[in-house]
Image: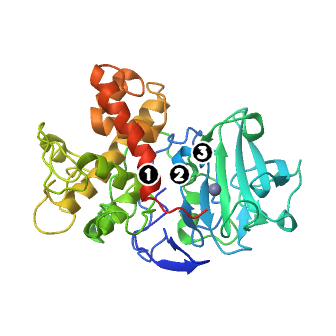
Amino acid sequence: MKILAGLIALWLAAAAVVVIFLLGDDNTCTPTGSAPSGGSGVPAGTGHTWPVDPAVFTVSDVFGARGGTHLGVDMAAPEGTPIYAAMDGTVAASGAASGFGDWIVLDHNIDGQIWSTVYGHMYEKDLLVAVGDQVKAGQQISRVGTNGESTGPHLHFEVRQPPGRLAGGQAIDPMPWLQDGGTATPSPDPHAANQAAATTPAPTSAPAAPAPTAAAAASGCGTSGSGGGVDNLKPGSVPPQFEQWYRKAGTTCPEISSALLAAQGDHESGFRTDAVSPDGALGIAQFMPGTATATAPDGQPYVIDADGNGRADPMDPADGIIGQARYMCAIAHTIEGWEVDGKVTGDVTALTIAAYNAGEGAVLDSGGMPNQIPRHFTETRPYVAAILADIPTYAQQLS
Ligand SMILES: [Zn+2]
């Protein structure tokens, strides 16, 4: 579901840090479609809900941050904010854990396989469940704390694939998983958007980028800012004239973030708006002309007139950056579909970056990270590694 409606950056000074609200005041951009299911790999319709009211928390650190070592998402919220079980399940752990302060691990049986959700940095006094307890989605299990290796109150939330957290299951990005919606009972005090997420079944068909509705287009919300992505851009990390566009672009879909796009922009053009490559790639995001004008899943070209100056032009930095996001999201959704179909394996983010460089066909033909021609090894793979390594340079690092 497109939960995180509207990109409005509200600044919150808290504990001497500045965090960015993901939930803006643009509530006219209510959810209008479903994010692709399957990106998380979780079967659709299994039902999950937000572990913290999305009207309350702000993402202070994304999955995969810190050079890929951050295996959850950090949801900053005031100390004492209720934490809810994200799915029906069984309490597998509840107590002290290294680095986490106190944690709770819930195991969820989905079609006979054990997935886990993990909740960290709480205080012992706030553990409301014990090992072996059965919990329901939306049931309060604890309260936000700042215990353990933490610099401010937040929930560290993980989603682990089978065989589950305590059996070494791999982490996946929780945000697309949460935004896939579900059929769970909403949390006791649901935000309007959360309520929609909790009552709308996740789509079961192959992923496809949702087209904006007429209402969304009419309210100016159709192009970006309503896609559930993450504006995690570190202030001052990009040239100031581009900052608003990377912030806006980062929210286009859950699979991307502002920091990812900025790291990619640096590698594509060094933020040079007049960049033209020998191949003819244009502008800050290095669009090939044919790609810029190709039709995105929403029926518009990838490069649109984002800044409203009357022309859609990849040499225009706003149009290029927003176009970059639109293209990245389309690629990500395509790759998620291929993963569901078993045609491709690997990290969706890495493969999406690879496809931006080498084309989606290279990913499909390779069944994952491109391996078909020498350039895939000499250019594409280093390009992917460099961008992933640089994301922390552009991302808020709070805790
Ligand atoms: Zn964390």
**Cα distance between the residues tagged 3 and 1:** 33 Å
Q: Amino acid at mark 3?
A: Gly
Residue 65 spot, x, y in % from top left: 53, 51
Q: How is the image coloured?
A: rainbow
Q: In the picture provided, is 253 more to the left or to the right than 171? A: left
Q: Residue at x 49, y 36 (%)?
A: 347
Q: Where does residue 398 sit, x and y in percent of width and height?
A: 57, 64
Q: Position of residue 182 (x, y in %)?
A: 59, 51
**Which numbered dot is residue 65?**
2
The residue that appears at 52% across and 74% down in the rendered structure is 18
Pointer 2 with pointer 1, Cβ within 8 A: yes
Which of 357/50 is in front? Answer: 357
The residue indicated by pointer 3 is 45
Q: CA distance from mark 3 to mark 2?
A: 29 Å
Please state which amino acid type lies under the numbered disc 1: Ile
Residue 57 pos. (x, y %): 59, 69
Q: Earlier in the sequence, mark 3 or mark 2?
A: 3
Q: Quadrant of residue 24?
A: bottom left
Q: Is residue 187 left or right of residue 389?
A: right
Name which residue type carries label 2.
Ala
Packing grade of label 1 (10 A; few <14, some 14-19, many >=20) is: many
Q: Which residue is mark 1?
A: 391
223 horizontally vs 170: left or right: left
Q: SS class of the residue under badge 3? A: loop
